[in-house]
Amino acid sequence: MNRWKLYNEIRNTRTLKRWVIEGLNLSGLDFSDVDCEGSKFIRCNLQGADFSRSNLCEAAFQRCRLSETKFESANIKGTKFISCKKLSTDQIVFLTDKGAVFEKTQGLEPAPITGVVLLALALLLAAYFALPSSKPTTGDIPANLKPIPDDACGEMTPEACLAKGKEALEAKAYDKAESLLNSLRSRGHENVEVIFYLARLYIETNQLKKAKPFVEQVITMKPEPLYDLPSRQYLAQIYYQTGLHDKADEELLSLYTKYEADHAISRDIVYLQATLYWQGGEYEKALATCQRLLKLSDKEQIPEVELMIGLIFRDSGRPLQAKEKFQSLIRNTLTPTDVANNARINLANAALSEGDIIAAERLFRDAVESSADPGQCNELATRISTSLTAAGKQEHAKELLTYVIGKFPNEIKLNSSRIALASIKLTEGKKEEARQLFDWVCRKPSNQDQGRWACEMSEEIAKQINAGKITTKP
């Protein structure tokens, strides 16, 4: 068994019922809508893999790497997680709420640390977050914020190094930004800007445990609103995402009271509260908060709130109401292009789930032509191409993937589409064309695991070409 045999099985049958898959690098692989009931994944790298809408009932993951693995709308009732690596607190809380089981399971390999322990650690972390801060209010840096020695700033002035760190953060080059900011701290430059941007970095990379002390330190420095406001919003976000919903509400109420006179800021606070309710699955609270938000919005802002309402309907199992909301947004001439495209993408996904490939493709192409988000286009393109291939329309699938890649020729977010197109090329015996696609992903990967695997595929195909082999499957 190797990755490509597994990929072809998924593409051809959309089922992996009761499979045992062990020791494979499956990073970034698309398992969405696949029936994996009763399957076992043992010591697999599943970083960035997508199990959205898949059936994982009674499946098991043991000693797997699950960083950034997606489980949205998957059936995970009774799914077991045993000693898996890189599980975030948010993942544990989400999976537990949806029916996953964290425990040592008979019949699988023994593991030194069970999922129960991981869950206990997550709950201890939430309890720690609930404790009142004992940090000084003088601006002194607590012991747990001591910087790691780093000389990334080199000969730069502190101002230049901070500017480079902020630039890297804006470009989402998080490792570089962290190194530069910690370099400043190791040299004693621990002002509110440096601490704030480190807090923001850890929030954006979902490292809540790391973010919290930095967020709290910014607040104790009593900074200007430019740093105080987002820091307190971050704190509310941390509270909510670690299960401390009441503390999150208290923080947002306090923040709203403080900035109530500023209409734009108070609206942003209500928007954040609606978002947290929605993402936390408290859909009725989210809808009620959206109604409040509509009253605080001007006519240009209303479409984005209507979009959130549509997404809440979608996620709370009200597809007809969601569809009506998305359609009204597309018809509304005041709807901003990005909001309308988001509505098109959601309608296309709904159509695809209903088996209407024609409607899904029409909406998809409308979104692409309107310059929709490349990441959303990539995900939808791979779903549609998979459905087309399953329906015996491989040539149509190939044309669609070629079309979307051509629209975003230099966009790494299209790498999954490039990989899907490469697999079709391989089945057609067009090895050099497949190798070129893998080579592109190898040179410009979305993540290290994807790059490493794409490089291996490119090299393997090149060897086959040079050896004059007839085999088309890796």
Image: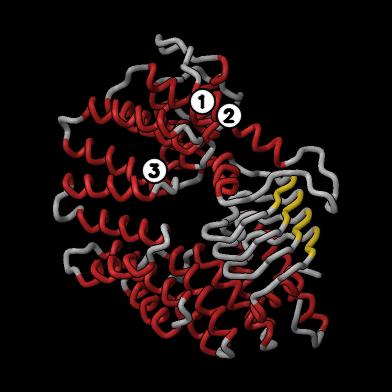
Question: Which residue does the numbered mark 1 point to in the structure image?
Answer: 129
Point out the image quarter for the C terminus: bottom right
Residue 4 in the image, given as x and y percentages of width and height:
72, 72
Q: Is residue 282 above or below residue 245?
A: below
The amino acid on which the numbered mark 3 sits, given as a three-letter code, is: Leu
Q: CA distance from mark 1 to mark 3?
A: 17 Å
Which mark identifies residue 367?
Answer: none
The percent position of residue 429, horizontal first and vertical second, equals: 70, 87
Residue type highlighted by circle 2: Leu
Give the residue displayed 40% in from the left and 22% down from the top: 218
Q: Which color scheme does this rendered protein use?
A: secondary structure
| Viewer-nearest residue: 68 or 178 | 68
Residue behind mark 2: 125
- Residue at 78 percent across and 69 percent down: it is 2
How far apart are the two marked residues, 3 and 2, measured between alpha carbons?
Answer: 19 Å
Labelled pair 2, 1 in contact (Cβ < 8 Å): yes
Disc 1 crowd, CA 10 A, few/some/many (<14, 14-19, 20+): many
| N-term mark: 3 or 2 | 2
| Residue 444 visible from this viewpoint | no
Residue under label 3: 276
Does dot 3 land on a helix, a strand or a loop? helix
Three-letter amino acid code at the position of disc 1: Phe
The vertical placement of 453 against 63, above or below, is below
- As displayed, is residue 9 above or below residue 203? below
Q: Secondary structure at mark 1?
A: helix
User: How many residues crowd mark 2 within 10 Å: few (<14), some (14–19), many (20+)?
Assistant: some
